[in-house]
Amino acid sequence: MLWPQGLLLMQTLMKFLQQPPRFLFFTGKGGVGKTSIACATAVQLADAGQRVLLVSTDPASNVGQVFSIAIGNHITPIATVPRLAAMEIDPQAAAQGYRDRIVGPVRGVLPESVVKSIEEQLSGACTTEIAAFDEFTALLTDEKLESDYDHIVFDTAPTGHTIRLLQLPGAWSSFLEEGKGDASCLGPLAGLEKQRERYADAVAALADPQRTRLVLVARAQASTLKEAARTHDELAAIGLGQQYLVINGVLPVPDTEAGDASDAADPLALAIRSREQATLAKMPAMLAALPSDQISLKGFDLVGLDALRQLFAESAITTAAAAGKVALPDMPALSTLVDGIAEQQHGLIMLMGKGGVGKTTMAAAVAVDLARRGLEVHLTTSDPAANLSETLDGSFPNLTVSRIDPHAETERYRQHVMQSKGAALDDAGRAMLEEDPRSPCTEEIAVFQAFSRIIREAGRKFVVMDTAPTGHTLLLLDATGAYHRDVVRQMGGSERHFTTPMMQLQDEKQTKVLIVTLAEKTPVLEAAGLQADLRRAGIEPWGWIINNSLAAATTTSPLLLRRAANELPLIDTVAHQHARRHAVVPLLQEEPIGLDRLRLLTTPSPLRHSK
């Protein structure tokens, strides 16, 4: 086996791989390394003589790319690894098939407007999640697979929210057919009743610690640990308590005897290591109590068998193994985007992206730079984990700050739904209706309504919004929607001017959407998916921000330089395939908290990599 020059290896047996049960599930936020860890696990089990099936339900799955073969939605042997086969469940294809099964029988029977409304209700994340669960429950209960494979490894496990929905009793189809429900997640459940026995068997398998092990994957970052804690609580609450924790991508302590002196002295590497250790020391207590493993950060792409077999190794990267010179492309600074935003003197600026990419920090940096130019700015967030006051750490002329409480807004929305739609329902109907507003979709809608109340301010000042609603929510609001459609219908033929919140979001002169991502494969794929959703809603993103880039930072660490080189193809993909305009923000030695450090994010600085 060929190892990269200068890479010292010592294989270790991870706790989550000790006496592994039949089913292994890996779950966590996008970009934490679930796919790589799942693939490496499958390879290690197969190398040990076990018959293994690797299954991915991740919409951004790159399992085929990892093994350099085409896999797809069928069981495919991995020729280079005896006893290993893989398949990729396409959640979008599964969701489309699921929609066809539900919508097909009513097409041509119900009015076209009703059919379109049903299709839109089935267009979002809840349907995709449930349809993917529908696909892999077959794998959990298939007797033939039981005889063919010793282990089935799943990349991206179901969430507690999905499993809880599948445990609910009741005739969802009749509930919908009688017109008693039209809220966010009832539609996706309409076709489940016939499958309920199979789902019960699947949920029982998931809850059996002798058969199933759930592995929560996180990084040494507060946001991913918070997501892991939330998932832990969701799954434990429904009886799925056999959980392990894996902290991936931890910057290793340099081995100066192996030649890592430059890594030991690099200020950026020292700062990253200090931040990670401080975060791990403060992780939530329920996570600290779990059996856990740490996987060190690697300087190479986890593609190919050699790389996968090194993932669980204790390694020291020597100077000889470093990436060497990094040729840097032109990487526009965040200030160039703010220059374009500031030209109109007012407007709505919405920062969107997956959790953990730094939306709150980027929103604060944009708001501070606009205020620094003498423009009036209102900065607001709906992220319960975002503390804008802490991020700003001080006041600034021309800048006001507010926070929308998602829990309070959701409760207000829930009460409205129960009082309006639930008033004429019987007890069973009210129980079903009561369940639906607990879904994540409902929170998105409630927060959007709160956003809508302050959108009007953008006509006279800048309103910068952190954690904007997803494209799915915008579609749902517009297509069920009663506000936008009612206003258009009521105002049709009238010469009176009117603007709905949706119209304002679709007008680039009034609203500029900035998508925030990281220079990593999964976050870029997820950001591209978000952009596609927004375009379906008639919203064209104005620009992209690539945050925490090592390629834009100053470092002498061999390991970090290798990582910086890996970022360049992804930055090029964003620049030439996805974004009309973009900015690259460097990873700073100190966390960007406080006005002075936030201003550093919009201050162009010379890059000092080797060129």
Image: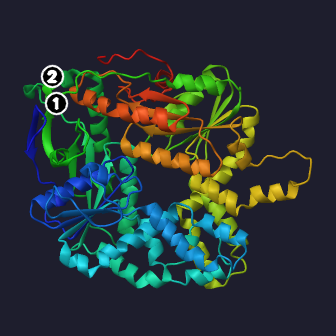
Across and down, in percent, residue 172 comes to 56, 80
Q: Which picture quadrant has residue 143?
A: bottom left
**In what element is the residue under mark 1?**
loop
Q: Does residue 203 appear in this view?
A: yes
Q: Earlier in the sequence, mark 1 or mark 2?
A: 1
Image position of 609 (left or right of 44): right
- The residue positioned 69% from the left and 63% from the top of the image is 480
Q: Quadrant of the N terminus?
A: top left
Q: Which picture quadrant has residue 230?
A: bottom left
Question: Front-most of 16 and 40?
Answer: 40
- The residue positioned 57% from the left and 26% from the top of the image is 337
Image position of 343 (left or right of 76): right
Across and down, in percent, residue 171 comes to 55, 84
Across and down, in percent, residue 606 comes to 41, 14
- Local crowd at mark 1 within 10 Å, few (<14), some, or many (≥20)? many
| Label tally | 2
**Vertical position of residue 523 compared to residue 599: above or below:** below
Q: Which residue is mark 1?
A: 254
> Which disc number belongs to residue 261?
2
Across and down, in percent, residue 268 comes to 30, 25
> Tag 2: residue type?
Ala
**Vertical position of residue 169 compared to residue 530: above or below:** below
**Would you say the residues marked 1 and 2 are in contact, meaning their CB atoms lie under 8 Å apart?**
yes
Q: Quadrant of the C terminus?
A: top left
> Tag 1: residue type?
Pro
